[in-house]
Image (spheres, helix red, strand yellow):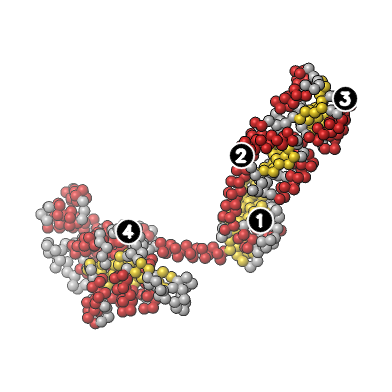
Amino acid sequence: MIPKFIITSPNKQFTQMVYNTTREISFTDFILIENALEDAVGLVCKYIREYPISIIVSRGATAKMIRKVTDIPVLEADSTPFDIITSIMEAMKTSKNIAFIHYDKCITENFSNIINMFNINLKEYYYTNVHEIEQCVYDAYRDKNEVVVCGYSYIEDVCKKLGLASVMYSTSNYAMKEILSKASLIKYAQERQLQHEKQLRTFIDEMPDGVIYLNEKNIITLINNTGKKLLLLNDDQDIVGQPISNFISKYNLMEIINKKKNELGKEIDFSGNKILIRSTPLFAKESYIGTVLIFQKSSFISKLDQNVRRQNMKKGMLAYITFKDLEATTVSLEMKNCINKAKQYANTESTILIIGESGTGKEMFAQSIHNASSRRDQPFVAINCAALSQNLLESELFGYEEGSFTGAKAGGKPGLFELAHNGTLFLDELGLLPLTAQVQLLRVLQERQVMRIGGTRMIPISIRIIAATNSNLIKAVENGTFRHDLYYRLNVLNISIPPLNKRKDDIPLLIEHYLSLFRARYNKNIKSCSPNFIQSFQNHNWTGNIRELVNYIMRIVILSNNEILTTDDIIKSEVNLVEDESYDPKEQNDLDNHIVLTPNTLESMEKNIIKWYMEKYDGNRSKICKALDISRTTLWKKLSSLEDE
């Protein structure tokens, strides 16, 4: 057992008391030195070098001497006044002429009360080192004292030589228990502190940033491993305890430190490297006590920033559109039917095929389905199959292992199927998927497992696939460019989104929605649109569908400085609106199927819509609310505004 304590004993009586007490309280891990003064100090120094001593228990003069040679805590097991009185009473049995020999007046301050109490002749003698002990005993003998009270066995030995009786004063068992209990508590506290310091040191050493702590005189008191490497310092070099100017005096760091102000990010040149420094001065009651420096290579910070951006991109695999967004921009019955169908599909786990022209909002439907499904809190991963080559598409979809092909990243890369695990994978422009990729996609749909390019193991995945196409997949199957088994595997549930030319009554709502979005984004003060402006948009042949409309509105908003948009803004923005000859508002004035919207303000057009539905359903408010997908309260407010006119 490795000793953690040292106990010094000045005499055999004290030694026996220590052994009795330690056995009684099961106190172990100690070395007992039966010696005092200089001899004891020499042995203490020897054992300190050999063992991890935490606490030293000593007494009187010896304790004071030990403190001068070590920083290890020294607890004094001094005799109590009761112990001394007990020894004097024992000495009185021999004679009332008593000599009290002790170290440097360290025990008794006022013996007059004791002398008066016991009616004795008591005289003090004291020494400052071991060499003065014999002289003290001779002086006591010469002064005709007949008994000596002392606490050191060497004094007792000298008394025997002169024929003087002696009584040893000691420390009580109770007092020793208190001292040893305190020693155990201090040891426990030391161990806890060392553990915390070790943990903190390990943490600081493992930090990717360099850390230096300077005291108030700019002396290095701590530096971690990263700091040594960044400052090109040898691990074996004696750094702690040295002024920081010894190592970086050639650079403008001292100017930063001497300012004694927070420096959030100062770049300095150090041995050809750009180092980013953060400096934090420390104060205690307004007194400066030191500075903490944290630093790193600027190139490392740049890499961290790039990694964070990559992680944010990965985290950005989110769906932002909901069914409320779609419902807010349509009055078309056909569009409402598509939304209602999509809502029902969202509650299932089946694969969905969305069919529609380019720009009709297929991805918006896919995002809405995802956000209404049980996978809403998981990734939404979208990929355009037409945007990637065959080889790149396979590696993006299925991932690859390290070394599977030239240019493959170290460690490999997970594919989009893996990234979409537990979420939704949206495959846009599915009709352009190469046949080889179609085979792999079919296997994934069947087995719900994926194997990376160059891999040897199957990776299980749980995903929902939503596919979209603007082409006729049945013709592609007939032509052999699309696998029939994959088509039937994908076409479990389907949605056919109408083109914008078949839902032109939605154009005023779409204009209002995107106008609100872009005027906020570009800080414009656009309040409304003129009737001619809206009519021009309704007359246009929207071959690019909603995507084309969004782009035109964005361009017009950016270039306009007017509060009300007119056809002049369309001309100024060089937006070429081609009249759709097939669009005839009169032709759409069929109360069973179409709403006639005379170009006017958005508010007036909303009132026209309400009136149209009132006529169509003969004032049946339940049917009107269902058709418009609004609450009865909202309809009541709209009707109230009509009655006020």
Labels 4 and 3: the sequence-earlier one? 3
What amino acid is labelled 1 in the image? Glu
Outermost residue, bottom direction?
479
In the displayed orientation, state which residue is furthest to the right. Answer: 142
First in sequence, mark 1 or 3: give its number.
3
Q: Give me the C-alpha separation between circle 4 and circle 1.
A: 54 Å
| Local secondary structure at mark 3 | loop
Disc marking residue 255: 1
For marks 2 and 3 on the same chain, the one whose residue lies earlier in the sequence: 2
The residues tagged by marks 1 and 3 sit, at their Cα atoms, a distance apart of 73 Å
Q: Quadrant of residue 20?
A: top right
**579 lies left or right of 195:** left
Instruction: Give the quadrant of residue 339.
Output: bottom left
Which residue corresponds to mark 2?
A: 26
- Which of labels 4 and 1 is toward the front? 4
Q: Position of residue 568 (x, y in %)?
A: 30, 66
Q: Are marks 2 and 3 in contact (CB under 8 Å)?
A: no
Secondary element at image label 4: loop
Q: Say if mark 4 contacts mark 2, CB within 8 Å.
A: no
Q: Amino acid at mark 3?
A: Asp
Residue receiving disc 4: 376
Badge 4 density bin: few <14, some 14–19, many ≥20, Cα 10 Å: some
**Res. 414 image quadrant:** bottom left
User: Residue placed at 75% from the left, 35% from the top?
Assistant: 11
Q: Position of residue 109 (x, y in %)?
A: 76, 26
